[in-house]
Image: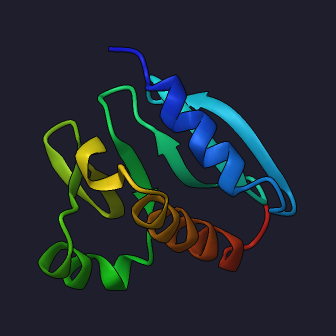
Amino acid sequence: MAYDEGLAERIRELLVDQPDLSEKKMFGGLAFLVGGNMAVAASGQGGLLVRVDPDQTEELLASTAAFPMEMRGRSMKGWLRVDSTDVRTEQQLGAWVARGTSYAASLPPK
């Protein structure tokens, strides 16, 4: 499955003023990086992939509709998936994009 180009464009519009932003095809999707650190991606599996503080993973899983990102059958702390139905509005998408870019910007640049 290819990533949702409409979702990628919506993300791009939200990040137009983000300093040190780049895009890169990763994981079958289109990732948006801040300082070389992945923040969010239009996932090749559909929906949104969001990088968050690993210490907040459990709280976000319990309090939002996000679910764990799994790679090779293992959940990855600090990486969440959000279904496309949960980012339909700009407010919904904006909250996740802000969360991902904030965390990525807190990391040392690559």
Please identify the quadrant where the N terminus is shown.
Answer: top left
Image point (86%, 58%), residue name? 20
Instruction: Estimate the x, y position of residue 5 in percent, counting from the top left.
Output: 53, 24
Q: Quadrant of residue 31?
A: top right
x, y (%) of residue 82?
29, 53
Tell me the residue at 20%/57% (across/down).
68
The number of numbered badges drawn on the structure is 0
As drawn, 85 above or below 110: above
| Image position of 110 (left or right of 80) | right
The structure residue drawn at horizontal position 31% and vertical position 31%, both measured from the top left corner, is 46
Q: Which residue is more in the foreground, 11 or 104?
A: 11
In the rendered structure, the answer to whether residue 63 lies left or right of residue 21 reads: left
Image coords of residue 104 (percent x, y): 63, 68
Question: 57 or 3, which lies in front?
Answer: 3
> Does residue 79 appear left or right of residue 58 in this picture?
right
Relative to residue 29, is residue 90 depicted above or below?
below
Nearer the observer, 59 or 10: 10
Which picture quadrant has residue 92?
Answer: bottom left
Name the quadrant of the C terminus.
Answer: bottom right
